Image: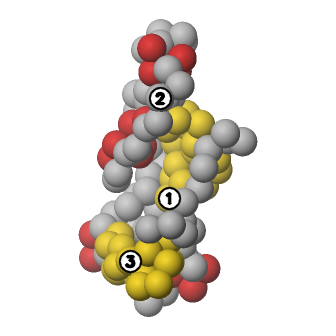
């Protein structure tokens, strides 16, 4: 991928879910052997498969400002990546409660 690709220079809004989040990210950890091609279109760092294997999948209700404030939104995490860092121009729309973060390699329900 060229350093100054169209994906890096466009100012349009971008959204990625699951593998799309990884592919659009600027940096990724825990990638497959040999690394992974990234578009570097979003100023985020992700940890691939942060929540473990598929057996560790879970759901969590999350309050999302301007979208699901009164009734929490039911989010499903299936081998999901975690966005671990965001650039100064990235707007975070929701965060996961700390009690859902893995502790010692296990997901807390």
Residue 69, how many percent across, how many down? 50, 78
Residue 34 visible to the viewer: no
Residue at x-position 50% and y-position 59%: 82
Residue at x-position 54% and y-position 12%: 3
Q: Which residue is mark 1?
A: 82
- Mark toward the viewer: 2 or 1: 2
Q: Is tag 2's residue or tag 1's residue first in the polypeptide sequence?
A: 2
Compared with 90, 96 (above or below) is below
Q: Which residue is mark 3?
A: 73
Q: CA distance from mark 3 to mark 1?
A: 18 Å
97 relative position to 72: left or right: right
Do the numbered discs 3 and 2 sit on residues whose CB atoms are within 8 Å? Answer: no
Query: Could you say which quadrant of the image residue 97 lies in?
Result: bottom right
Compared with 42, 21 (above or below) is below
Q: Which residue is mark 2?
A: 12
Residue 66, how many percent across, how many down? 50, 66
Q: Nearer the viewer, residue 1 or 86?
A: 86
Q: Residue furthest left?
A: 54
Task: Assign a secondary structure to mark 2.
Answer: loop
Which quadrant is the N terminus positioned in?
top left
């Amino acid at each position: 991928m060229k350093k100054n690709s169209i994906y890096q220079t466009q100012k349009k809004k971008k959204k990625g879910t699951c593998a799309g989040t990884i592919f659009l990210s600027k940096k990724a950890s825990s990638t497959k052997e040999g690394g992974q091609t990234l578009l570097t279109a979003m100023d985020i760092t992700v940890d691939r498969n942060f929540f473990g294997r598929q057996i560790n999948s879970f759901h969590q209700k999350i309050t999302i400002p301007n979208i699901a404030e009164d009734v929490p939104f039911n989010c499903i995490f299936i081998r999901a990546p975690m966005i671990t860092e965001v650039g100064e121009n990235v707007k975070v729309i929701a965060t996961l409660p700390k009690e859902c973060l893995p502790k010692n390699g296990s997901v807390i329900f």
